[in-house]
Image (tube, helix red, strand yellow):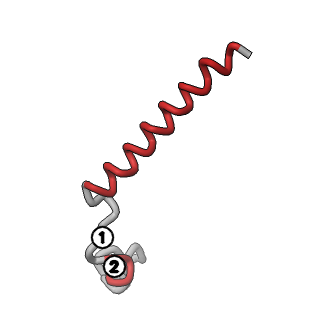
Amino acid sequence: MNILAILIPISLILGGVGLYAFFWSIKSNQYDDPKGNAARILSDRYDDSPEED
């Protein structure tokens, strides 16, 4: 039972670190994509198909 006195605070600290990292990523616009996949799929720039002669 003494192990719970160690594991519970460690899990709370790790959860807090993960929550902080998540909010930091939102604040620093890591999830913003102004062009988006809808516009990117129409572009030929990223076309991986072989060119025809």
At 61% from the left and 23% from the top, the residue drawn is 7
Give yes or no for contact between labels 2 and 1 (Cβ–Cβ under 8 Å). Answer: no
45 to the left or right of 52: left
Indicate the position of residue 1 as horizontal and vertical percent values.
74, 16
- Dividing the picture into quadrants, the one containing residue 26 is bottom left
Indicate the position of residue 38 as horizontal and vertical percent values.
38, 83
Q: Secondary structure at mark 1?
A: loop
Does residue 53 show up?
no
Q: Secondary structure at mark 2?
A: helix
At 60% from the left and 27% from the top, the residue drawn is 8
Q: CA distance from mark 2 to mark 1?
A: 11 Å
Q: Badge 1 is on which residue? A: 33
Along the viewing direction, whichever of 45 and 8 lies nearer the viewer: 8
**Residue flagged by tag 2: what amino acid is it?**
Arg
Measured along the vertical axis of the image, is residue 7 above or below residue 24? above
Indicate the position of residue 6 as horizontal and vertical percent values.
60, 18
Mark number displayed over residue 40: 2
**Residue flagged by tag 1: what amino acid is it?**
Asp
